[in-house]
Image: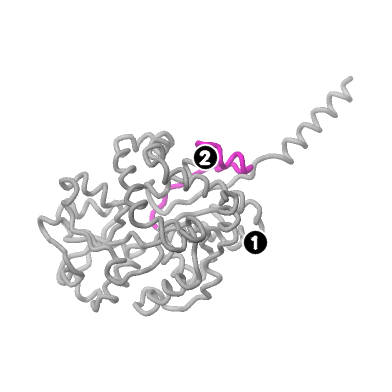
Amino acid sequence: MKAISFAVVVAALISSTAFADDKVSVQLDYVVRGNHAMFFVAKKKGYFTKQGIDVTAIQRGTGSPNAMRLVGNGNAEFGFGDLPTLAVARSQGVPVVALAAVNQHSPLGMLSLKSKHPLTKPQDLKGLTIGVQPSGSTYVFLKAFLTVNGMSMDDIKQATVNPPYENYLLLGRVDAVPGYIDAEVPELEAKAGGPGSLSILQGSDFGYKVYGSGLFASEKVIAEKDDVVQRFVNAYMQAFADVIQNPEEAADIIVEANPEYASKKDVLVKQIEADIKGTFFSPETQAHGLGWMTSDAWTDTTKILLEQGAMKDPIKVDAAFDVKFLGRANALKR
């Protein structure tokens, strides 16, 4: 009887091990924002579980460059961050690959308090004190934005700031900051007097036509865990569609996972709505589905970065992104 019981226990252990969910972690680029909702929605609704994946952690970050390094070094299987910064990281030897361009258009722009320093054109930035975080994606943007509009860093005054650097603008310590219209703007407006209280120069309106933020993984994970990557992308894209359909629900799920964000629920909704209105969609997503990327768009992105000095060395564009997982995931919905 004991021998039979022991055999049953061993068989159960072997079975549970064989079918155990694959454990992965996610590295965010910054504090939690609206365009991070897909991770929390997929986890809450069981999409990851249905794909045999256990997301053990969704870690907040200190900027896109660091998120790239952490994923490239194997500290997390998946990451989320600014894709132009991913191109710069690859030029520096960081082995990360874009899996989806969540923001088809860069949501980065220059922000100021309209009552103090109204901005109508890039040249209005000349002589102003700009808050910069030298190691962040906003710095990559600032250099490129100035250059494409016939200026350089010498035309502004730089003040090094630490996250959350938007507070420096509200306190009047800087005149303008580079920031995300789908992240900082709703939060800043809530503190600065409501809609219309900010001057906003969106980069995509003034020559900075590149991808925004997106999902990525390391070359090693893609090579060694192809099936895990596919199942993760399947769940992520299912959640992406849900976020677009119901921003309010997505914000509730973010708050449930991050109770300290309860007072920011309205901001989270506005962040998601800003992306729905301005960055999630493009002709490519209309043709191929959400998150789609093309070699032409990546070539344009790297060209801008090279021409404007944000990236020193060219990269192999087709190695910087991989849409096969996205293609399969989108095909599941048809």
Number of numbered labels in the structure image: 2
Residue where numbered disc 1 is placed: 223
Mark 2 Cα shell of 10 Å, populated few (<14), some (14-19), many (≥20): many
Q: Is residue 267 above or below residue 290?
A: above
Q: Secondary structure at mark 2?
A: helix
Q: CA distance from mark 2 to mark 1?
A: 24 Å
Residue sitting at x 45%, y 78%: 313
| Numbered tag placed on residue 163 in the rendering | none
* Disc with the residue nearer the chain's start (2 vs 1): 2
Query: Residue 66, how many percent across, how many down?
Result: 44, 59
Q: Is residue 126 above or below residue 177?
A: below
Residue sitting at x 52%, y 40%: 43
Query: Residue 247, how many percent across, how many down?
Result: 38, 42
Q: Tell me how the rendering is colored.
A: one colour
Where the N terminus falls, by quadrant?
Answer: top right
Q: Would you say the residues marked 2 and 1 are in contact, meaning their CB atoms lie under 8 Å apart?
A: no
Residue type at mark 1 is Ala
Query: Residue 315, how many percent across, how many down?
Result: 50, 75
Residue 259, quarter of the rendered image = top left
Residue type at mark 2 is Lys
Which residues lie in the magenta part? 44-63
Residue sitting at x 24%, y 53%: 166
Q: Is residue 214 above or below residue 36?
A: below
Residue sitting at x 46%, y 59%: 285
In the image, is 101 to the left or to the right of 56?
left
In the image, is 181 to the left or to the right of 88?
left
Residue where numbered disc 2 is placed: 43
Q: Is residue 52 magenta?
A: yes
Residue 331, quarter of the rendered image = bottom right
Residue 16, quarter of the rendered image = top right
Q: Secondary structure at mark 1?
A: helix
